[in-house]
């Protein structure tokens, strides 16, 4: 027997392991749901597809048993959350496979909610720690009421991946699971952005659903309480930007662009919770495809019909196409107009550089493939006939840029995917698919300032400029606070608006808006919460948050037009007298402040924020190296003619002494030759002398 056991020991051990696993499966399966654990998507849980009215049957909402007739259509109520549901929570790890969260939304005005929009979110804090931050989670559509109650109530599922669930389980107290919900964001038809709806409720779940608690639990002990919480409503967020005068060292066309938001906090909140010391926000970054600004109405009107079209192959062959633009990157050199270009649009494409003939007219065999940015298509163009090429001039406003993105998306120039569920992807050179998460605590000494660089290039004299001997002056701003209070001193009449704006690191135009905002809110006597509740307040404190520094690129563009050369009779491209430039910048889509942090010195309090996301685009400013707007479109090179005239006049003035000047020049030129001749002669003399002595000996 012992020999038998010894010979089959490994088989017996394997059998024992199998039996243990089978017992574990049977015992565990008696209380766990049939679906294995995985990331939650709509359709995984049976509860995803259950009827809304069945779900809410017998539920207690606002102290009353749910009755659909109490939730009629009405214009007097806003969209709001009916209840927040926890599904299948268990403190046993092997029973968490079906854990999910659901939201039931009452839609009293019958709004057409875009239920599958990627802009639908909910903001939640898990656990009962008032110092913890809120996070945004995507809402997935499950269903809506139908028939006579069509669209009256919507059911959404909170998307939680495996990492989210693990963090939640680590945070929640199994006996009292607290979910603080500050807001939901829903997109409706006719609105490009989601609208934030006030929730401001702490939901506490205790007990367990049948089969998910203690092994002996055979019936549900689950219960829920809901109580209102404070949140901060921000429906008045302003935006600002600031660009130093010089470039940021990347190249001659790129500047630092500092992005900021400002908002008003009721003083009653500061009295209750202490000073504002931090906030959390998120956004999606996207870099615009180059946009064009021109002061030429002729060029604007001609090219408008070509927006969204690839013109690289038709700019020469299409007689109706009359204009093109190019941004030079190199200085004028002999034989070339410009060596290379950073942006080229509407000009013939070939291999080489742009050349001009002796008249100054650009030849028809224009070559532009050496450009670092050949734009075969233009999607957005702005006309500003007052633009005179002055540097650091604000030309295209933020709202005009955003409207242009909407219009270009509506035009549907080509097939595209959506960026931020709002704009056509072809309008951007690049864009993020994941949100940038931002958090600042001004008590963190390592993360309280934002850096800026301003670099200017100058030449001491024309000779240094000719040979490119530049003097670079660089200024770095290293002590700009990320978050600070705006006070009356920031608008002091002792300084000009320009100085005050620079001290706040905002543009002069944004400074004027910030000043108006300050005067409007600082003494405002009431505070209106997102639910419409109005309360008295002793005024507001204004804060500004400088959240990012990005690149702003702007290059002065030369305008070319098709024209006949009256000297040679050829057809080519000539330079128009107009001010134009291309620009690119980073825009911040779905910018949203999620929570704010207060402290009274002893206790920190994090409040959720109710804020509808916004899109932020800063106004365009003209290049830091504007052009001179010279024209050659009459087919005559006036610079060349003027130069010839000046030479002739100079010759006439110098005529009496010209022979002497010529003699002097000839004398100067001949000096080296005379010197060489003298040296040769000197070298020959010793030889001649030796030869004479030899003759004498003979």
Image (spheres, rainbow, N blue to C red):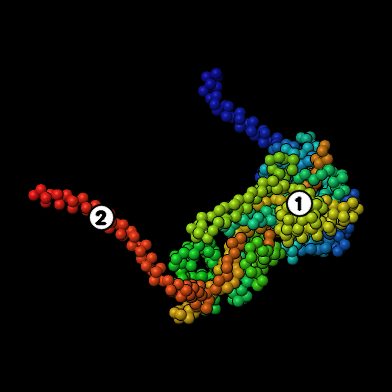
Q: How many numbered badges does the structure rendering display?
A: 2
In the image, residue 222 above or below residue 251: above
Q: Is residue 130 left or right of residue 241?
A: right
Name the residue rendered at 73%, 56% in the picture.
499
Q: Secondary structure at mark 1?
A: strand
Q: Nearer the viewer, mark 1 or mark 2?
A: 2
Instruction: Give above or below for 683 relative to 364.
Output: above
> Which of the 4 quarters of the picture holds residue 52?
bottom right
| Disc 1 packing (10 Å; few <14; some 14–19; many ≥20) | many
* Residue 237 coordinates in the image, percent (x, y): 77, 56
Viewer-side residue, 672 vs 599: 672
Residue under the point 63% across and 53% down? 454
Residue lying at the far front of the rendered structure:
696
As helix, strand or loop, the secondary structure at mark 2 comes to helix
**Residue 669 seen in the figure:** yes
- Which residue: 59% across, 76% down? 302
Disc number placed over residue 599 in the picture, else none: none
Residue occupying image coordinates x 61% and y 62%? 623
**Which residue is more in the foreground, 359 or 125?**
359
Residue 284 versus residue 402: which sits nearer the camera? 402
**Sequence-wise first label, 1 or 2:** 1
Compared with 167, 586 (above or below) is below
Describe residue 242's horizontal placement relative to residue 198 as left or right. Answer: left
> Where's the N terminus, which quadrant?
top right
Density class for disc 2 (Cα within 10 Å; few <14, some 14-19, many ≥20) is: few
**Residue at numbered disc 1:** 544
Q: Which of the labelled discs sits on residue 680, or is there none?
A: 2
From this viewpoint, is residue 358 visible?
no
How far across and down, in percent of the image, does residue 550 sit?
A: 64, 53
Q: Where residue 6 sits: x, y (%)?
A: 53, 21
């Amino acid at each position: 027997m012992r020999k038998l056991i010894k010979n089959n020991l490994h088989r017996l051990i394997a059998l024992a392991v199998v039996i243990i696993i089978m017992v574990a499966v049977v015992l565990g399966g008696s209380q766990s749901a049939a679906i294995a654990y995985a990331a939650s998507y709509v359709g995984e849980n049976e509860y995803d597809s259950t009827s809304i009215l069945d779900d809410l049957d017998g539920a207690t909402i606002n102290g009353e048993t749910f009755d659909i007739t109490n939730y009629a259509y009405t214009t007097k109520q806003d969209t709001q959350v009916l209840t927040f549901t926890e599904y299948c929570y268990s403190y046993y790890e092997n029973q968490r496979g079906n854990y999910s969260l659901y939201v039931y939304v009452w839609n009293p005005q019958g709004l057409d909610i875009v239920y599958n929009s990627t802009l639908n979110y909910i903001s939640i804090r898990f656990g009962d720690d008032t110092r913890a931050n809120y996070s945004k989670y995507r809402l997935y559509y499950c269903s809506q009421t139908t028939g006579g109650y069509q669209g009256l109530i919507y059911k959404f599922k909170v998307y939680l991946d495996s990492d989210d669930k693990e963090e939640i389980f680590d945070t929640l107290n199994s006996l009292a699971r607290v979910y603080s919900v500050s807001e939901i964001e829903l997109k409706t038809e006719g609105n490009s952005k989601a609208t934030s709806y006030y929730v401001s409720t702490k939901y506490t779940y205790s007990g367990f659903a049948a089969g998910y608690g203690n092994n002996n639990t055979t019936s549900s002990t689950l219960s829920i309480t809901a109580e209102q919480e404070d949140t901060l409503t921000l429906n008045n967020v302003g935006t600002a930007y600031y660009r130093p005068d010089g470039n940021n060292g990347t190249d001659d066309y790129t500047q630092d662009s500092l992005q900021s938001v400002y908002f008003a906090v009721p003083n009653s909140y500061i009295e209750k919770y202490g000073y504002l010391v931090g906030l959390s926000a998120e956004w999606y970054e996207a870099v615009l495809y180059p946009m064009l600004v021109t002061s030429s109405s002729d060029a604007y009107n001609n090219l408008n019909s070509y927006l969204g079209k690839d013109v690289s192959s038709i700019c020469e062959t299409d007689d109706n196409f009359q204009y093109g633009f190019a941004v030079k990157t190199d200085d004028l050199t002999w034989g070339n107009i410009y060596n290379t270009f950073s942006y080229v649009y509407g000009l013939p494409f070939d291999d080489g550089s742009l050349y001009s003939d002796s008249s100054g007219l650009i030849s028809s065999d224009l070559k532009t493939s050496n450009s670092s940015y050949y734009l075969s298509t233009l999607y957005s163009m702005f006309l500003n006939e007052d633009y005179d090429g002055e540097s650091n001039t604000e030309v295209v406003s933020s709202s005009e840029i955003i409207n242009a993105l909407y219009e270009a998306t509506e035009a549907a120039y080509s097939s595209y995917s959506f960026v931020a569920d709002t704009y056509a992807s072809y309008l951007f050179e690049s864009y993020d698919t994941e949100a940038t998460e931002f958090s600042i605590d001004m008590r963190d000494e390592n993360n309280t300032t934002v850096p800026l660089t301003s670099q200017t290039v100058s030449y001491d004299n024309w000779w240094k400029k000719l040979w490119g001997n530049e003097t670079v002056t660089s200024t770095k701003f290293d002590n700009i606070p990320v978050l600070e209070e705006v006070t009356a001193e920031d608008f002091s009449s002792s300084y000009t608006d320009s100085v005050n704006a620079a001290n706040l690191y905002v543009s002069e135009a944004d400074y004027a808006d910030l000043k108006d905002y300050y005067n409007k809110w600082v003494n405002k006597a009431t505070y209106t919460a997102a639910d419409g509740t109005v309360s008295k307040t002793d005024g507001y404190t204004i804060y500004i948050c400088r959240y990012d520094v990005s690149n702003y690129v702007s290059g002065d563009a030369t305008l070319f037009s098709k024209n006949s050369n009256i000297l040679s009779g050829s057809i080519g491209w000539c330079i128009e007298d107009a001010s134009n430039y291309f620009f690119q910048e980073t825009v911040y889509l779905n910018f949203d402040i999620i929570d704010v942090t207060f402290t009274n010195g002893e206790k920190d309090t994090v409040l959720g924020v109710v804020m509808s996301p916004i899109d932020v685009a800063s106004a365009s400013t003209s290049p830091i190296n504007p052009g001179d707007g010279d024209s050659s479109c009459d087919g005559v090179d006036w610079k060349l003619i003027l130069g010839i005239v000046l030479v002739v006049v100079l010759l006439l003035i110098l005529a009496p002494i010209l022979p002497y000047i010529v003699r002097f020049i000839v004398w100067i030129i001949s000096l080296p030759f005379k010197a060489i001749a003298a040296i040769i002669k000197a070298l020959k003399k010793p030889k001649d002398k030796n030869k004479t002595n030899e003759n004498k000996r003979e």
